């Protein structure tokens, strides 16, 4: 389904409450497969995976397309949230490592072996590039 068709379907689904909404069920069979049904999953000896409100009065296959579009949009949003959380965790880890290098070699104590200074300097550069590539906020 292209974006325009999905948008139309989503608008129809949003207005379903006004125009009369139907409920369809995404069922999960005990074998693990999924299917959509106009009747409760229990009647098919399956478990409910999702309940969707869709416009009443349209063919079942169109109702399924609307419900699947809602589900795809939800899953896309959840995937984006997981990706953002992973990015934030990565940023925090990089900043923590950079702070450790700063404390170790940038504090001016002079107790750091020269070999460590060189490797810390290289790692600092790598971290700086990774922070920029990950679009991490400046501390």
Image (cartoon, grey):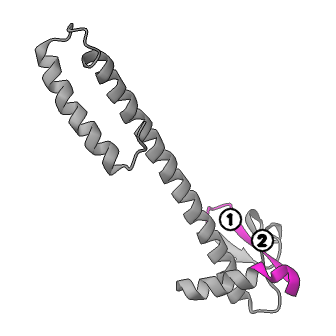
Quick check: 46 left or right of 68? Answer: right
* Disc ID at residue 6: none
Structural crowding at the residue carrying mark 1, measured as other residues with C-alpha within 10 Å and reported as few (<14), some (14–19) or many (≥20): some
Of residue 50 and residue 19, the one placed in the foreground of this image is 19
Task: Kindly give the residue lying farthest to the front in the view shown.
Answer: 108
Q: Is residue 15 magenta?
A: yes
The percent coordinates of residue 88 (x first, y second) are 47, 43
Structural crowding at the residue carrying mark 2, measured as other residues with C-alpha within 10 Å and reported as few (<14), some (14–19) or many (≥20): few
Instruction: Please tell me in which quadrant of the rendered image residue 51 appears.
Output: bottom right
Instruction: Please tell me in which quadrant of the rendered image residue 13 appears.
Output: bottom right
Q: Which residue is mark 1?
A: 29
Q: Which residue is mark 2?
A: 44
Seen in the picture, residue 128 relative to 31 is either above or below; the reply is above
- The quadrant in which the N terminus is found is bottom right
Q: Which residues are magenta?
A: 14-33
Of residue 137 and residue 53, the one placed in the foreground of this image is 137
Label 2 to label 1: alpha-carbon separation = 8 Å
Of residue 72 and residue 39, the one placed in the foreground of this image is 72
SS at mark 2 in the image: helix
Instruction: Please tell me in which quadrant of the rendered image residue 69 appears.
Output: bottom right
Q: Are marks 2 and 1 in contact (CB under 8 Å)?
A: yes
Query: Is residue 46 visible to us here?
Result: yes
Quick check: 32 left or right of 102? Answer: right
Query: Is residue 20 visible to us here?
Result: no
SS at mark 1 in the image: strand
The percent coordinates of residue 48 (x first, y second) are 75, 63
Quick check: 133 left or right of 33? Answer: left
Of residue 95 and residue 79, the one placed in the foreground of this image is 95
Seen in the picture, residue 122 relative to 27 is either above or below; the reply is above
The percent coordinates of residue 22 (x first, y second) are 83, 81
């Amino acid at each position: 389904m292209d974006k325009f068709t999905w948008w139309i379907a989503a608008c129809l689904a949003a207005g379903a409450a006004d125009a009369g909404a139907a409920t369809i069920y995404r069922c999960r069979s005990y074998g693990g497969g999924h299917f959509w049904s106009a009747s409760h999953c229990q009647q098919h000896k399956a478990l409910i995976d999702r309940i969707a409100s869709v416009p009443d009065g349209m063919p079942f296959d169109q109702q399924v397309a609307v419900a699947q579009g809602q589900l795809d949009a939800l899953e896309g949003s959840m995937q984006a949230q997981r990706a953002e959380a992973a990015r934030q965790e990565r940023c925090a880890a990089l900043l923590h490592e950079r702070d450790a290098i700063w404390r170790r070699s940038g504090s001016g104590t002079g107790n750091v072996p020269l070999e460590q200074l060189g490797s810390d300097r290289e790692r600092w550069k790598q971290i700086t590039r990774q922070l920029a590539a990950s679009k991490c906020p400046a501390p």
